Amino acid sequence: MSQLFTVKPAFGESALILLTVTKSLIHGHFVLRSKDHADEYVNARKLFANPERFWRMCRLFAFCVDPSAPIDTVVGPARGGNDLAKGVAYWLSQLRFPSPKKDPDDSPIRCAWTDKVGKDDFAVAECHEEFVRGKRILLVDDVSTKGGSLEKVKRSVQKVGGEVVLALTIWNRGGVTPGKLGIPIGSLITKEIPSWPPDQCPLCKDGVPINTDVGHGKEFLENKRMQNRETSIPVGATDWSF
Ligand SMILES: [Zn+2]
């Protein structure tokens, strides 16, 4: 099979510019989806809120995909991944079938939504299952640290009979590899941003306040508060005659 994708250095540079001008790349003390802590964070929601820049990012994704790569549908993890899937599907269609005479209702590349299931999983939306069942799927995501979301979306696609052929992300920050994911993966930017388990985080040790606006900082602090409360209950306190 020919190469499914090529990420030229210029694509990575453009992606970094888009993240920078939309203030999506920020510094501080963050809790990631993987529960690890980091001093740099890619807040893709800022990019998603800027349609012009977001559309350009989707176009970069489409440029990376080989024109002969077998793709019917694009899928990403809810919520942001749904937007990304829509934009990438649009640009793939435009690049592969540029004729202005084509019927826009017969877009050759589709996108399918996923829904969040429980706290930490995804499922292909029932209304879009028909675009996944028996189809060849391109997975897209904004930032991958350990590949957990991509892995879960891959499983949700397979559950309804789709075949995942490739995954593309804006930023691969933790070294997610095809071996880990079981499919080829490409990223516009491949740069490791150091992250640490909470008990080894140097920022926690230095008492740097955790950002609660983005990422999972709020949840982390809430859990910590609960744990502290539990450990401060004196022995015997469950005996109400105490
Ligand atoms: Zn920390």
Image: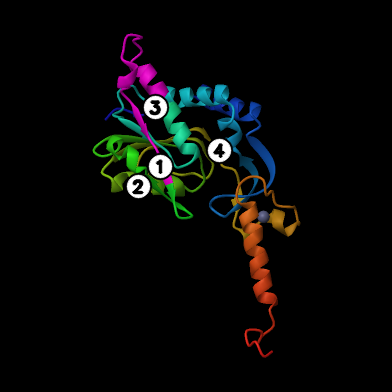
Q: Mark 2 sits on what residue?
A: 156
Numbered tag placed on residue 114 in the rendering:
1
Instruction: Answer above or below: position of 103 versus 238.
Output: above
Q: Earlier in the sequence, mark 3 or mark 1?
A: 3
Q: Mark 3 sits on what residue?
A: 89
Q: Earlier in the sequence, mark 1 or mark 2?
A: 1
| Structural distance between the alpha carbons of marks 4 and 1 | 27 Å
The 10 Å Cα crowd at callout 4, few under 14, some 14 to 19, many 20 or more, is few
Q: Earlier in the sequence, mark 4 or mark 1?
A: 1
Q: Earlier in the sequence, mark 4 or mark 3?
A: 3
Marks 1 and 2 in Cβ contact (< 8 Å) = yes
Residue found at the far left of this picture: 134
Marks 2 and 3 in Cβ contact (< 8 Å) = no
| Structural distance between the alpha carbons of marks 4 and 2 | 28 Å
Q: Mark 4 sits on what residue?
A: 191
Q: For residue 171: magenta? A: no
> Amino acid under label 1?
Thr
Q: Quadrant of ligand 1?
A: bottom right
Residue 18 spot, x, y in % from top left: 59, 26
The 10 Å Cα crowd at callout 1, few under 14, some 14 to 19, many 20 or more, is many
> Amino acid under label 4?
Lys
Q: For residue 90: magenta? A: yes
> Which quarter of the rendering shows the N terminus?
top left
Residue in the image at 53% along x and 52% along y: 34
Q: Which residues are magenta?
A: 89-115
> Amino acid under label 3?
Ala
Q: Earlier in the sequence, mark 2 or mark 3?
A: 3
